[in-house]
Amino acid sequence: MNVGEVSIGAFLEAVASERIVPAGGTAAAVAGATGAALCEMTCIHAEQATVERSPAEVELLAEAREELQRARVRLLQLGDADAEAIEALQSVLRGADTDSEETTTEQRRATGVPLTIAEACLSVLEAAEVAVELGAENASPDAVTGVLLAESALESALYIVRHNTADLENDSFAGTVRNRAAEIDTKADYAVECALADIDVAIRERR
């Protein structure tokens, strides 16, 4: 399945089925891509608005929009990659030696893809600060929704990573992956805090 080309309805039907894939990783990637698209839209509207901006702000909006576009496309590709990785892992597991403690290439890929999904979502969150800060006020709900979707997608992908490494305690690969997951999680918390800081202030001022 090419998640970038099928309809939303067809994708959800495939998820809600007896099929192994698409599953959590692909769904997280699609959610992250949706978050990127919302923040990208906010940047586009801000660029087209008849608001006088400094050259620095114009450059920030353009850079953020381009980064969000790259992340959106990348996340859809990763959604397909996750489905392929899970299918390959399931195929190997059906004929594998269950007593073997060796981490297979398929296990590494099934863990590495969701880690990469989380990294791509982090890129969305870091670029989203510009969308929220410089976007029009009436578009702020769209940008904030994008941030929250990307955050949820990132946390979901990291949960998959941790779940997939739970049985690999003595494997150096698992340790490296868990360390990277922790770094992404910390950076994501900071990015969300920065992106929503102005929104939180605005909400408090309205109360």
Image (cartoon, rainbow, N blue to C red):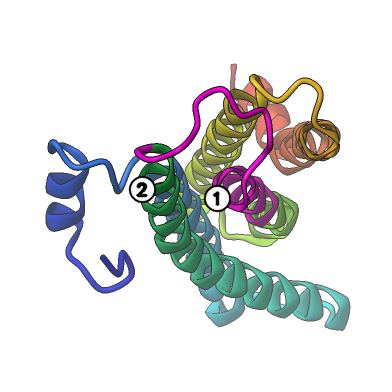
Residue 89 located left or right of residue 69? left
Compare marks 2 and 1 and give the one earlier in the sequence.
Answer: 2
Which residue carries the number 1 mark? 106
> Looking at the picture, does residue 97 appear above or below residue 4?
above
For the record, the magenta segment spans: 94-120
Could you tell me residue 117's position as x and y percent?
A: 59, 51
Q: CA distance from mark 2 to mark 1?
A: 9 Å
Which residue carries the number 2 mark? 91
What numbered label is drawn on residue 134? none
Residue situated in front as seen by the camera: 146 or 137: 146
Residue 105 located left or right of residue 88? right
**Alpha-carbon neighbours of circle 2 within 10 Å: few (<14), some, or many (≥20)?**
few
Q: Are marks 2 and 1 in contact (CB under 8 Å)?
A: yes
> Looking at the picture, does residue 164 appear above or below residue 30?
above
Could you tell me residue 201's position as x and y percent?
A: 73, 29
> Looking at the picture, does residue 79 appear above or below residue 53?
above
**Residue 46 appears in the picture as rendered:** no
